[in-house]
Amino acid sequence: MADELSAIREELREAAEPDRVPDLQRFFKTGPGGYGEGDTFIGVRVPACRRVVRAHRGLSLPGSLRLLESPIHEERLVALLLMVDLFESDPGSRRDVYEAYLASTGRIDNWDLVDASCPRIVGTYLLDRSRRPLYGLARSRSLWERRIAIISTLALIGAGDLDDTFAISERLLGDDHDLIHKACGWMLREAGKRDEERLVAFLGEHAPAMPRTMLRYAIERLDPATRARLMAIPRADR
């Protein structure tokens, strides 16, 4: 395992573009007070990370979890993508990967890490199980656990099950973080592709309490007249 982890780290460093690091630090808000404060980038593009993943398919779950402990963002991304690959390629591993993922949310600490992994692990695992874990995550004080709760429903939407997307979005209406507003709006928009009538009804009911960013994301695919009508609904706190 140690040799393979060393190889992964070396391949990532060979693919690094240090000139990209300042832009990545700004984009992922790594400065003081930012949601990614203190995160470390080495400048590896996502396609290059995915090439490393393909070269190391079959890394054990303990190996991926070791890599997930890294302070380097791209190493954590590769670790999560390897966990996704293990989950999808080895049905017998699914429970272990799911449980390890939820035990490691402290290391899944930026929106790209969440979005690249949680629907394919958490959402997929819960397709034929109780969704109660998502509601526990939605109540978390952790921004990233709350984002996992709503983004995981992308897998449920893909299966035609929209109930949890709407229910969790409703519970997160009062969230104070823009990344949650965007995430809920995105998932509502995806749900609307399956059932536009239900989306419009939900937005008509909840627009007064809904952050404007969430609403704007949710209505992007609606016709102009419907978008204008929903945006014209005044906020309840005005």
Image: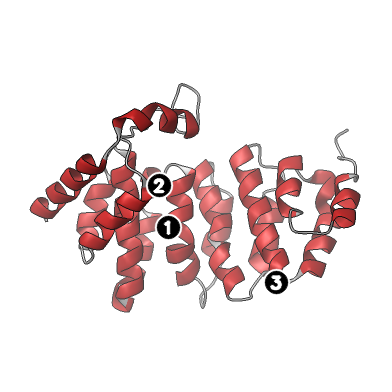
Task: Specify whether 233 is left or right of 124.
Answer: right
Q: Is residue 218 visible?
A: yes
Tag in front: 2 or 1 = 1
Q: Secondary structure at mark 3?
A: helix
Tag in front: 3 or 2 = 3
Q: Which amino acid, mark 1?
A: Ser
Of all residues shown, which one is farthest toward the left? Answer: 3
**Rendering coords of residue 157 (x, y %):** 61, 69
Q: Which residue is mark 2?
A: 108
In percent of the image, x 88 and y 33: which residue is there?
A: 238
Q: Is the Cβ of the residue at disc 2 closer than 8 Å to that at disc 1?
A: yes
Residue 141 falls in image quadrant: top right
Disc 3 residue crowd, few under 14, some 14–19, many 20+, Cα 10 Å: some
Residue 10 falls in image quadrant: top left
In percent of the image, x 55 and y 56: which residue is there?
A: 151
In percent of the image, x 37 and y 49: which residue is there?
A: 46
Q: Which amino acid, mark 2?
A: Ile
Q: Nearer the viewer, residue 57 or 234?
A: 57
Q: Is the Cβ of the residue at disc 3 closer than 8 Å to that at disc 2?
A: no
**Rendering coords of residue 12 (x, y %):** 23, 44
Q: Which amino acid, mark 3?
A: Arg
Q: Which residue is mark 1?
A: 117
**Rendering coords of residue 1 (x, y %):** 11, 56
